[in-house]
Amino acid sequence: MNLKQIRFALAVAEEQSFTRAAQRCHTVQSALSHQIAKLEEELGCALFERTSRRVRLTSAGQAFILPAQRLLAAKQSLVEEVVAANGTISGTLTIGTISTINAIDLTEKLSKFHRHYPAVNIRLYVGMSEELLEDVRQQKTDVAFVGIWPGDIDMLPVSHRQLTDEPLVALVAAQHPLASRQRVNLQTLSEVPLVDFYSGTGARRQTDRAFQAAGIKRHISFEIDHIEWLENLVQRGLAAGIVPISTAQRLSALVSIPIEDGPRRQVYCVWPQQLSRTAERFLQFSGIELT
């Protein structure tokens, strides 16, 4: 068994295709298939069920995934530790973040970090909080910035730090019927078209549970997955939005209105228990305490 075989198997599991996995690993499909066959032979069991239409994990394959991911992460950590001992910080720093990250100026931190550690390859991507938390659990991400409803704190991994706790406010266009209000309540908001993140996400639970607690039914006219969609729909007067106050302050062309007994949003920085030296240095550089 070698690391190449493990990397190939993980690629097949994620792509659900030998062809796409070979393209991703920059090798030919026959070579990738041969290496996985050798790995399965050594393990004494099949990792994948192969048909003409799909590839899926066997029960043994499902058990293989997490330890394999940990093994590759440990290998990367080993390389980084050795390089760091030689006085150099290098490797890849992968950071995931929600689109409404206002608790920290992430681009500024990354810019300064890059100037200090130019040998580090920085990878940044935007996702929903649930996806980011799962990536941290699977050690696909070194650091993630997530937003959750206060009641969802049990979703967080052991390693986390709270960055903010802020109220959500109503967001409307200047010509919206509610724009002149000093305050609104949930009942009033339920009577106008609303835009919100899609059902099941942490961002949506923040508002869903506020309305449920008040015993108020609402109708979501527009379901989106990025703050830019919400901003554009509100700007066009198609709907009212409910966003963190820090996001509303950034969208100065729109009107923000405090919500009586409105929901709150907490932002956390989270990371795996096995933190790479590069990620540890980034957190320290960003002023985020590890203990």
Image (cartoon, rainbow, N blue to C red):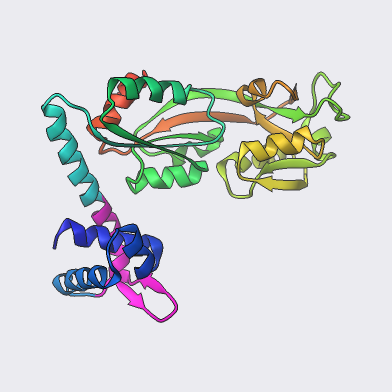
**What segment is highlighted magenta in the picture?**
46-69
Above or below for 84 versus 193: above
Could you tell me which quadrant the N terminus lies in?
bottom left
Q: Is residue 191 above or below residue 106?
A: below
Tell me if I can see residue 64 in this picture: no
Residue 250: % across, % down: 63, 22
Q: Residue at x 46, y 30 (%)?
A: 268
State the image coordinates of residue 286 (x, y, percent, origin top left): 37, 20
**Residue 249 at least partly seen:** yes
Quadrant position of residue 162: top left
Residue 126 as seen in the image, left or right of residue 288: right
Q: Position of residue 113 (x, y in %)?
A: 34, 22
Was residue 48 drawn as part of the magenta stretch in this picture? yes
Q: Residue at x 17, y 26 (%)?
A: 88
The front one of 24 and 66 is 24
**On the image, which quarter does residue 190 sit in?**
top right
Position above or below: 32 against 70: below
Does residue 107 show up magenta in the picture?
Answer: no
Q: Quadrant of residue 258?
A: top right
Side (left or right) of 11 relative to 253: left
Q: How many marks?
A: 0
